[in-house]
Image (cartoon, rainbow, N blue to C red):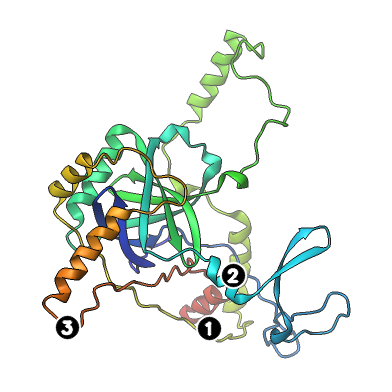
Amino acid sequence: MATTSKRALWKGAISFGLVHIPVALHSATVNQSLDFDWLDKRTMDRVGYKRINKTTGKEVASSNIVKGIEYEDGQYVVLSKEEISAAYPKTTQTVEIEAFVPLDDIPFVYLDRPYYLSPIGRGAKVYALLREVLKKTQKVAVAKVVIQTKQHLAIVMGCGPALVLNLLRWGDEVRPWDDLELPPEGSKAVGLTAKELKMGEQLVDDMSASWQPEQFTDSFKEQIMALVREKAEAGDISAVQEVDTDDEAPASATIHDLTEMLQRSLKAGTRTPAKEGSTATTTKESTAKKAAAKKSTSKKTAGNKSTKAEGSTSTTRSAKTTAKKAARRA
C-alpha cells in the first residue's frame, strides 16, 4: 500500500456561508503503473519527442507553434497565449461549497480523483464539525475548486477521520446509458424466479469478505518487476539520471470564531445554493475587513496575500527506478 503524502499541494480554506475552515490539500492516490521509457539501444540515451509538421514531416520550432480549437471539420480557431491566459479561472485557494446533496444522488460514474483535506492552524474543531454533520445527514458538499489553472467540480465528504475532496466529472463528460440495450430493473420485469434469486444471493454470501485492497495485485506488473529484479541482480542494468523537485507549500488561511460564524450564516439565510459562476461575497467582505484592520496598525501590510496553486500531480515511480534500488540492495 502506498505511503501517506504529508506534503500539501496547496493550503487554503473550505468556505460556506461565513464559515472558513483552513485546510491543506494532499494527494490521496499515487500512480503505480509501469513506466516504459524509450531508449536508444546503441547509446542508452533517452529518446524524446519532436514537434513534427504532419504534412511535411519536418520539425517545427516552438516559436512557430500556435494553439487552436477545431470548430468544424478541418476548420480551426486560433487562440493567442493572452486569450487563453485570460480565460483561466482565478486561483482562490478555496473550496467554494455550492450546495449539500444526498450522497446517493451522485452516481459513481461521476467520481474522478480523490484528495485528502487536513485541518491547519486552529481549524480542527470546525473541520470536525463539518465532517460529523456530513456523516450524520448522509450528505456531501458539492463545491468548485481550482487546482493549478483548471476549475473542477467536486464533492467534500466525511470518510473515517478525514474529509475527502473527490473531483467529479462535469455533466457533459459522462455518457448516458439510454441507448444501451439494458434489461429492465426489477426481478419481475426480467422474469427472475424466487429460486434463481435465492441461489444468486447464496453465491454472493459464500464469496463475501471484508475489503482488503492488499489482497488484489496487478499480475502483469508483478511479472515485469520480477524480470527487472532478475536482470538487475545479474548486472544487466543501465543507470539513468533522475531529477526530483520539491515545491514549497504556500501560506495557510485564517479561521474565525466557529459559533459566531455559524450564527451569522444562519441569520443571513445561506441555505440557498449558489448559482453557476457565483462567488462567496461574504468571504470577500470578511477578508476586506481584516485587511483594513491590519492597515491601521502598519503602513505596509501584505493583507491580501494570495497563495499560488501548486497543484502538482501525484508522484509516479518508474520500473527503472525500482530496478536501481533493487540493484543497490543486492
List the residue tagged with mark 1: 242
Give the secondary structure at mark 3: loop
Q: What residue type is labelled 2?
A: Ile
Marks 2 and 3, the one that precedes in the sequence? 2
Q: Which residue is drawn at 25% across and 55% down?
A: 21
Query: Quadrant of residue 145 in the image?
Result: bottom left
Q: Name the residue under label 3.
A: 299
Vertical order, 149 against 116 (above or below): below
Front residue (pair 193, 114): 114
| 317 relative to 297 in the view: left or right | right
Residue positioned 50% across, 67% down in the render: 149
- Tag nearer the camera, 1 or 3: 3
Q: How many labels does the image show?
A: 3
Rendered location of residue 153, percent (x, y): 48, 50
Which residue appears farthest toward the left when viewing the image? Answer: 297
Name the residue type under label 1: Glu
Precedes in sequence: disc 2 or disc 1: 2
Q: Is 188 on the left-hand or right-hand side of 309?
A: right
The vertical placement of 38 against 139, above or below, is: below
Q: Where is residue 71 in the image (x, y as percent from the top left)?
A: 75, 59
Check disc 2 and report its element: helix, strand or loop. Answer: helix
Q: Bin the neighbour count of mark 2 within 10 Å (Cα to Cα): few under 14, some 14-19, many 20 and up.
A: few
> Looking at the image, is mark 1 or mark 3 earlier in the sequence?
1
Residue 84's label in the rendered image is: 2
Q: Which residue lies furthest to the right in this view?
A: 56
Q: Can residue 22 be seen in this view?
A: no
Pick the quarter of the image with the N terminus.
bottom left
Residue at 58% across / 86% down in the picture? 239
Q: What residue type is labelled 3?
A: Lys
Which secondary structure, mark 1?
loop
Q: Where is residue 6 in the image (x, y as percent from the top left)?
A: 33, 66
